[in-house]
Amino acid sequence: MIATAIIFVVLGVLIKHGRFYNLIAGYNTMSKEEQATYNIEKIATLFRNVMFAMAFLIILSYILAKQLENEQINFYAIIMVSIIGIPYLLIKSNSKAYKNNNSN
């Protein structure tokens, strides 16, 4: 669980601060004109924040599982984080808020 959380943190840092935008699904396959319609800096910030939140929740569930001596908490936590976090990223990053003002 800790390794999964670390992976999320590393991905968040790479996307936002390392400018590894090709890790964002679909962005690297867009034409340059299509890429220009998106505010990639805002999308990268969104990805970093969501990845950090997912990592935090995974670590929190790990600590809770250890305290309660119930390892199933880890399983449920990773499932819930994935079911909520990934669709949130996809829906939010494709919203009008992340499009450049000059695009329609």
Image: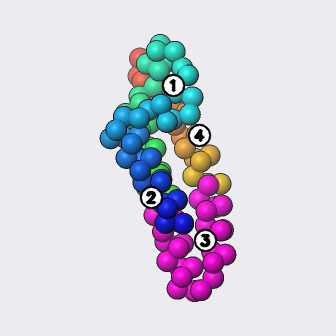
Callout 2 crowding tier (Cα within 10 Å): few <14, some 14–19, many ≥20: some
Q: Which residue is mark 3?
A: 74
Q: Give the distance between the C-alpha atoms of the residues marked 3 and 1, in whole angstroms.
A: 33 Å
As drawn, the label of residue 91 is 4
Three-letter amino acid code at the position of disc 2 = Ile
Q: Which residue is mark 1?
A: 28
Q: Which residue is mark 2?
A: 6
Q: Give the distance between the C-alpha atoms of the residues marked 2 and 3, in whole angstroms.
A: 15 Å
Mark 3 or 4, closer to the camera: 3
Image point 61% across, 67% down: which residue? 77
Per the image, label 3 sits on a secondary structure element best described as helix
Left or right, residue 9 beside residue 87: left
Per the image, label 1 sits on a secondary structure element best described as loop
Residue 22 place in picture, x, y as percent: 47, 31
Q: Is residue 65 above or below residue 40?
A: below
Overall secondary structure of the magenta stretch?
Answer: helix
Residue 94 place in picture, x, y as percent: 55, 33
Q: Is residue 36 above or below residue 85?
A: above
Q: Give the distance between the C-alpha atoms of the residues marked 3 and 4, in whole angstroms.
A: 26 Å
Three-letter amino acid code at the position of disc 4 = Ile
Q: Give the distance between the C-alpha atoms of the residues marked 2 and 1, in whole angstroms.
A: 24 Å
Taking the magenta stretch, the answer to whether it contains residue 71 is yes
Q: Earlier in the sequence, mark 2 or mark 3?
A: 2
Q: Are marks 2 and 3 in contact (CB under 8 Å)?
A: no
Q: Quadrant of residue 15?
A: top left
Per the image, label 2 sits on a secondary structure element best described as helix
Three-letter amino acid code at the position of disc 3 = Asn
| Part of the protein shown in magenta | 56-82
Three-letter amino acid code at the position of disc 1 = Asn
Image point 56% across, 34% down: which residue? 25
Left or right, residue 40 beside residue 76: left
Q: Earlier in the sequence, mark 4 or mark 1?
A: 1
